[in-house]
Image (cartoon, helix red, strand yellow):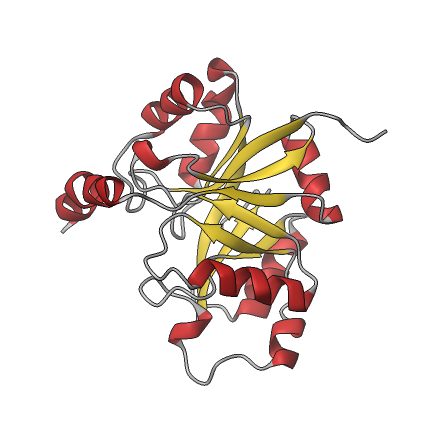
């Protein structure tokens, strides 16, 4: 039976465990009190401990947390979702995808046309069509809230269409104010429904990019304190 209920998930959120501004309880409280998200994924850079903490605490806040990681490959960032073990950094994209799939997880390429954060477009030579197809991805982040280049997300959506990949959205939040501004819509209400929707390609990216004031908030609350 097809669900008539559609829900929202933010599948790209950072915490203090990597380069985010907030601890896990603060993030969960903000999601529960100030958003209509049903599912989130904590995807800290090359770290899975934060996602496990959030997964453990999530029932107290009435939301579901997907255990995830933003994996640094040798050619850009990859979101490993629904995983249970940390994936080593520095692998090739196919190797990292395989490491995610061995765990029964989903591999989604993050911000593929980002020229500030790590992405395939910052590594020459650019991937060929055969290489893109050979990555064996489960989806592509076609709406990333943190993109400064207005062409980056449309190009990502076009690439996903050419490759026949499901498209997802994530805020890439490094501070709580932008959590959920970009998100993934999916039929159903649970993390299990989300997993099924990504597998079947019935999810869709939605939302908007960060505003100027939200970028300023990131600089003041996360970027400057980190440096």
Tell me what residue is drawn at x 52 percent, y 46 percent: 169
Tell me what residue is drawn at x 69 percent, y 25 percent: 5
Looking at the picture, how far across and down is residue 89, in whole percent?
43, 62
Can residue 53 be seen by looking at this rendering? yes
> How many numbered marks does the figure carry?
0
Residue nearer the viewer, 189 or 227: 189
Say if 201 sits above or below 59 in the image.
Answer: below
Looking at the picture, how far across and down is residue 26, in whole percent?
32, 24
Q: Is residue 40 left or right of residue 23?
A: right
Q: Is residue 128 left or right of residue 45?
A: right
Can residue 75 be seen by looking at this rendering? no
Tell me what residue is drawn at x 39 percent, y 21 percent: 34
Residue nearer the viewer, 227 or 194: 194
Task: Give the image quarter of residue 90.
Answer: bottom left
Say if 65 sits above or below 196 in the image.
Answer: above
Tell me what residue is drawn at x 61 percent, y 73 percent: 132
Looking at the picture, how far across and down is residue 76, in whole percent?
44, 66
Q: Is residue 24 left or right of residue 182?
A: left
Residue at the extreme bottom:
125
Q: Quadrant of the N terminus?
A: top right
Looking at the picture, how far across and down is residue 67, in whole percent?
53, 38
């Amino acid at each position: 039976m097809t669900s008539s209920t559609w829900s929202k998930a933010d599948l790209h959120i950072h915490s203090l465990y990597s380069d985010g501004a907030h601890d896990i309880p603060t993030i969960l409280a903000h999601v529960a009190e100030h958003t209509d998200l049903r599912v989130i994924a904590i995807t800290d850079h090359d770290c899975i401990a934060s996602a496990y903490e959030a997964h453990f605490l999530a029932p107290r806040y009435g939301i579901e947390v997907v255990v995830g990681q933003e994996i640094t490959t040798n050619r850009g960032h990859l979101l490993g979702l629904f995983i249970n073990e940390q994936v080593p950094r520095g692998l090739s994209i196919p190797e990292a995808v395989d490491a995610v799939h061995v765990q029964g997880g989903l591999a989604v390429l993050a911000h593929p046309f980002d020229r500030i954060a790590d992405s395939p477009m910052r590594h020459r030579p650019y991937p060929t069509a055969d290489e893109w197809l050979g990555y064996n991805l489960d989806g592509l982040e076609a709406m990333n809230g943190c993109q400064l280049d207005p062409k980056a997300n449309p190009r990502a959506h076009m690439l996903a269409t050419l490759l026949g990949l499901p498209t997802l959205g994530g805020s890439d939040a490094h501070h709580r104010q932008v959590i959920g501004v970009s998100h993934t819509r999916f039929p159903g209400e649970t993390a299990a429904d989300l997993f099924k929707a990504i597998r079947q390609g019935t999810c869709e990216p939605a939302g908007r990019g960060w505003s100027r004031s939200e970028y300023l908030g990131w600089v003041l609350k996360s970027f400057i304190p980190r440096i």
